[in-house]
Image (spheres, grey):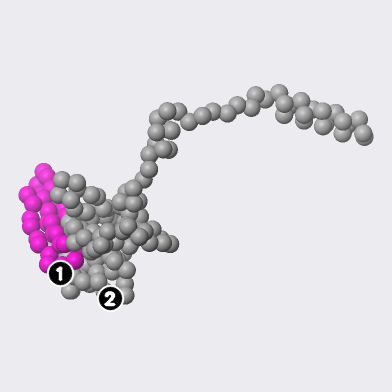
Amino acid sequence: MMLKKVITISSFILIATSYDITSSEPTLKIRYLMNEPMSLFDFGMYKLNEHLKSSSEYILDKREGVVIAVYDPDKNRINILGEAYIDDITQARKVCNDTISSIKSTLGVSYKTGEKISASAPDPIGSYFRYARYTIKSEAIDLYSELNNLTEIDIFIPIPKVGRFGGIRCKSPLMSKEVIYSSEE
């Protein structure tokens, strides 16, 4: 019995020590990525996109489609882009408007007034571009107001035509009740 234990333990030690334990270092390219800092703006865009993704069923009213936020550096604009697919093309304008309303609502903006739903509510866009647990003393004055004002919602509803797609597009600044419609051929 004792001999079996000794043989078992010896076998285990022999097997464990016979494997070459290797370690590796990250490559230069991976180290570059590891050392590159993420800006608060990048992280804010990520959090905004995660929010839109988790709210997309509500935003799109259970329709097929997509909603994402992208920054356009040439226009200095945060664009919330959406595309919703519908069966009844007579409803395109209504669906476009409802999608804008749903995006505003999920961000805490009244689609009727273009203002925050309540004075005590967090900034619609600004809340994604700040640290969760503390405030930086050097934070720019009116930063969140500027982020809200440079955000625009742009929704496209494709409508099949013979051999190609056209559609209805509607746009609205986040902090506005105005919606502009256009058709695309």
Please tell me which of labels 2 and 1 falls first in the chain: 2
Location of residue 143 in the rendering, given as x and y in whole percent from the top left corner: 25, 60
Q: Nearer the viewer, residue 37 or 109?
A: 37
Please tell me whether residue 37 belongs to the stretch shown in magenta.
Answer: no
Q: Is residue 166 magenta?
A: yes
Name the residue tied to disc 1. Answer: 177
The vertical placement of 26 against 84, above or below, is above
Residue stretch in magenta:
156-185
Instruction: Give the side of residue 150 with respect to residue 118, left or right.
Output: left
Whole-number angstrom distance, CA of label 2 to CA of label 1: 17 Å
Q: How many marks?
A: 2
Q: Where is residue 94 shown, x and y percent of the image? A: 16, 66
- Packing grade of label 2 (10 A; few <14, some 14-19, many >=20) is few
Residue 125 against residue 73 in the figure, above or below: below
Tag 2 residue: 119
Depth check, front residue: 6 or 21:
21
In this rendering, position of residue 164 left or right of residue 1: left
Nearer to us in this view, 149 or 161: 149
Q: Give the main secondary structure, helix, strand or loop, of the magenta stretch.
A: strand
Q: Residue drawn at (41%, 38%), measured in percent from left and top?
A: 35
Query: Do the residues bearing badges 2 and 1 touch, measured as CB atoms within 8 Å?
Result: no
Amino acid marked by disc 2: Ala
Binning the other alpha carbons within 10 Å of mark 1 as few (below 14), some (14 to 19) or many (20 upward) gives some
* Type of the residue with mark 1: Lys
The residue under the point 31% across, 75% down is 120
In the image, 169: left or right of 10?
Answer: left
Q: Tell me the SS state at disc 2.
A: loop
Instruction: Report the mark closest to the observer, 2 or 1.
Output: 2
Residue at coordinates 15% horizontally, 62% vertically from top-left? Answer: 172
Residue 103 can be seen, yes or no: no
Residue 104 position by quadrant? bottom left
